[in-house]
Amino acid sequence: MMRSVLASAARTTCARSTRLLRAQFSTSKHTGAPGSLYSLSEEEAMMRDMVTQFARTTVQPKVLSMDEQEKMDPSIIRGLFDAGLMGIETPADFGGAEASFTSAILAIEELARIDPSVSVLCDVHNTLVNTVFRTYASRDLQEEYLPKLATDKLGCFCLSEAGAGSDAFALQTRARRDGDEYVLDGTKMWITNSAEADVFLVFATVDPALGYRGITCFVVDRSMGVKVAKKERKLGIRASSTCQVEFDSVRVPASNVVGEVGRGYKIAIEILNEGRVGIAAQMVGLAQGAFDCAMPYLFQRKQFGSRVGDFQAMQHQYAQIAVDIEAARLLTYNAARLKEEQRPFAKQAAMAKLYASQVAERASSRAVEWMGGLGFTRELPLEKFYRDCKIGAIYEGTSNIQLQTIAKILAKEYQD
């Protein structure tokens, strides 16, 4: 009985922290003077608040069932499209919101505070798939696909293979020219959104002898013969589909090449920088979600005649986690603003992704401990946040790859 009462109280008070977090943000129109990293345009603040409401009312009631069933509820995907969250940066002419990159980052963060699985679905679709079309695709491909991707067709990004993970350019998927078509053969692994996707961005080599210079990006419709095979059973983000995708003599029009033949490696390198900022935002949101749920409990639960949150040892713990989350958020927002300003941001993206994933692990682990036995049960989302956080150190570049990226850039800066 006591556990049920405590769980109910914790769920009720989880929402209070949102008001406290909102108070930190200011809404300002950009002027000549720089503002803090919390200064958002009216459009960005509206996006953040709308996504917060969507996450609470539409996503939250389905989180537990989706996690247990390891399946994304179709109504959630439909809701994301209806809310305009699947074409955040897409120009209005193509049915999108034509909002800023920071707006996309805010949306990813807010969704992750409730469910990191829904967050990554939105993230991959926006920061990887839509951005590839906007930045590199021909006008014809943009006109054909961007409106669909903004309104009802989910996309996925097919780069990784069994032997091409961190060494992404060791891929073996082949693309053979046959008249006005390319014939694709190969297997992709760990593809997010693949179970539900209709549009696949596929990286394949036109000639293995060319090394990375043979890698080319293709737009492939599911209807062209894509086979979505084994679905992985995962530790966390279980509602997010992660599948093996097979291409067996799949014929793709030559006009579906994105950019130029042999330039796929450039697309992958550049786009993953944006994707890493998205994953950093997901991890910040996850950390904040875990913190939000645990903190009220510390001031409800009493032991030895005092509230748990009043013990000095506990105060030091939650103060440190608050600092960590703040620092991770600022790294993430800074990388997003640098991208918007068209300034180099590869180093900052790697730093944000690396640190935010570390903070997500610390914050979710601490939050489980703070709530004791209750935190270890499925009555609250803390055990799910704890399971979900681990992927942050793995996908879109492992933590070691982030460190290597940072080190390479630093070495270049100091050697030049």
Image (tube, rainbow, N blue to C red):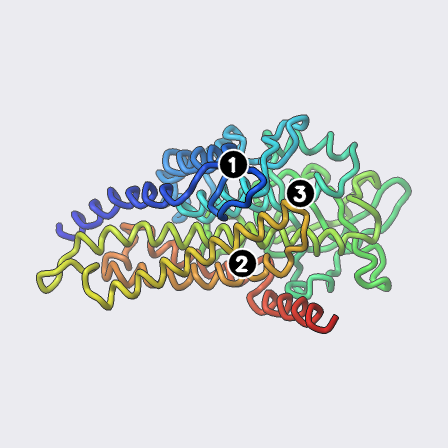
User: Residue visible at 65% across and 43% down?
Assistant: 129
N-terminal label among 1 and 2: 1
Label 3, label 2: how far apart the Cα atoms are: 20 Å
- Please report contact status of discs 1 and 2: CB closer than 8 Å, yes or no: no
What is the crowding at mark 3: few (fewer than 14 residues within 10 Å), some, or many (at least 20)? many
Amino acid type, callout 1: Ser
Q: Earlier in the sequence, mark 1 or mark 3?
A: 1
Relative side of 113 to 151, left or right = left
Residue sitting nearer the eye, 270 or 315: 315
In the image, residue 371 sits, relative to residue 93, either above or below, namely: below
Residue labelled with disc 2: 352
- Name the residue rendered at 12%, 60% in the picture: 306
> Looking at the image, is mark 3 or mark 2 nearer the viewer?
2
Q: For the residue carrying disc 2, how many other residues have a C-alpha within 10 Å: few (<14), some (14-19), or many (20+)?
A: many
Judging by the rendered image, the residue that carries numbered circle 1 is 41
Q: Furthest-left residue in view? A: 305
**Residue 182 in the image, given as x and y percentages of width and height:** 83, 45
Residue 141, numbered circle: none
Distance CA(mark 1)–CA(mark 3): 22 Å
Q: Quadrant of the C terminus?
A: bottom right
Q: Nearer the viewer, mark 1 or mark 2?
A: 1
Camera-side residue of 224 and 356: 356
Q: Give how far across and how far down residue 221 sits, in percent.
A: 70, 38
Tell whether label 2 touches label 3 (CB within 8 Å). no
> How would you rate the neighbour count of disc 1 (Cα within 10 Å): few for under 14, some for 14-19, many for 20 or more?
some
